[in-house]
Image (cartoon, coloured by chain):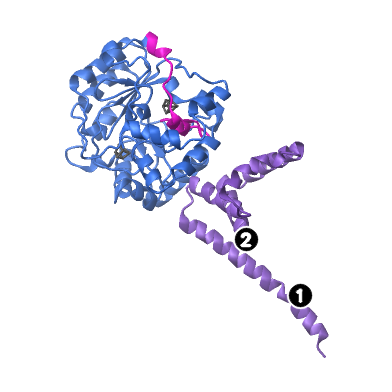
Chain colours: A blue, B purple
Amino acid sequence: MDAHEQLSVLDTSCLQKFVDTLAVNGQYPLKAAGVDVLQMNICRKCNLFCKHCHVEAGPHRTEMMSKSLLEKCLDILRNNAISTIDITGGAPEINPYLEWFLDNASQLKRRLIVRSNLTLLLEDSYRHFIDSYVRNNVEIVTSLPHYKAEGTDKQRGKCAFATIIEVIKKLNARGYGKENSGLVLNLVHNPTGFYLPGSQPALAREYKSRLLKDHGVYFNDLFCITNMPVGRYLEHLQKTDSLSDYMTELVNAFNSAAAENVMCKNTLSVSYDGQLYDCDFNQMLELPTETNAHLDDFDIGTLSHRRIVLANHCYGCTAGSGSSCQGSTEKSEK
Amino acid sequence: MHYYEKKDLADFPNIGEWTSEEAQKFFDYYTKATGDGKLSEREKTLIALAVAATQNCPYCIDAYTNKCLSLGVDKEEMMEVFHVGAAMMAGITLAHSTQMRKIVKKKEL
Ligand code: SF4
Ligand code: SF4
């Protein structure tokens, strides 16, 4: 399904448009309140082909951020007080300039995050990234949909769970996930079916005790992320005739407090070709920022107060405890 | 029209339509009783699923199956909950045979 079709399917499956729900709650229009995070989607190619992937990433994709655009990002970061650099993909390690970028970005002394599926890091040509992550004090975020193999493998593919655990063991041995080591490893839980994630603290407790008991591994925080009705997940919802139930669940769970904290208020997302978006989901739905901004005309003043471009997939960010790349957005949850 | 319809579950928050004060007190109590306490929310959710099963309540089975999933409970664990419910119901039924046997014994010559 192309982006246009996805948006129209989302339109017909919601009884009330997201912008109308915001308006009823006096929250429309939604405006950014700064740019604290630059989330860079540096390639759409991935060694995995996960069922919930909103990027529709996979081994067949070719989109890749060039070295010159990565340099441009470094320039922008150097010249603007953006506190967090958040690198995502696809599998970011597949971009041949990632290591070079990390060595340069770490000198800016910002919070440096890589969203890695970890499964490449056992391969000869990629295992050196563990050194690169340690050297550059990279905060690693990895998705582990369930603390048992069955749920994780169903979503991410055969043997994904065992491989991820294997790599976490290696990361733990280097200090990742250990209190006060300064090396942060955070896990992401996202539901392995068509339902919303439960309470983040409850799931974090369960993950911590099960992973330690069953596999002897540990991590820092667990982020609960709602599966967004975008990309491959949207297709699965449609194929299984679950779309309208799922959207109804998201709409009924609308939480205006979560809408106050949506991540687009402080995040800017850049795609492999330098186009700017309010978030990675808007990027996949081809909904650029309201001024159609590009890295070439980066103006933090305008971008910091931009009006966010919204559509019905945004219900995924405002349901229940809220959802963002940093997990649930409900402040009291942490 | 069926007596039970899936969409009616969404009407649960409206049970206070004509008695809002009582409903508010019930919801406060419900939230407190089923939330994290000395027992975790997960443990309480499993208990709630067992009660839903034994009371044959389709709304609660729907709600608590979803809540179990959202808390990471897997299907084998949920099936064990149903067996606990079934065993309890069988045990309760059989324990009541005491009444029957007492009466029969009293009536025998
Ligand atoms: S969810 Fe992540 S790991 Fe899975 S296919 Fe998408 S980009 Fe790759
Ligand atoms: S989907 Fe993107 S634009 Fe919509 S609320 Fe979430 S972060 Fe904001």
Residue B41 picture location, percent across and down: 58, 45
Q: Is residue A321 magenta?
A: yes
Name the image quarter holding residue A107.
Answer: top left
Q: Residue at x 47, y 25 (%)?
A: A262
Q: Nearer the N terminus, badge 1 or badge 2?
A: 2
Residue B99 is marked as 1
Q: Is residue A92 visible?
A: yes
Instruction: Kindly identify the amino acid type of the residue bearing the numbered disc 2.
Output: Thr
Above-or-below relation of A137 to A149: above
Q: Which residues are magenta?
A: A301-327
Q: Chain of mark 1?
A: B
In-image side of A75 versus A22 (left or right):
left
Q: Residue at x 57, y 53 (%)?
A: B61
Residue B31 is marked as none
Of B28 and B2, which appears nearest the observer? B2
Q: Chain of mark 2?
A: B
Instruction: Kindly identify the amino acid type of the residue bearing the numbered disc 1.
Output: Gln
Q: Residue at x 63, y 45 (%)?
A: B34
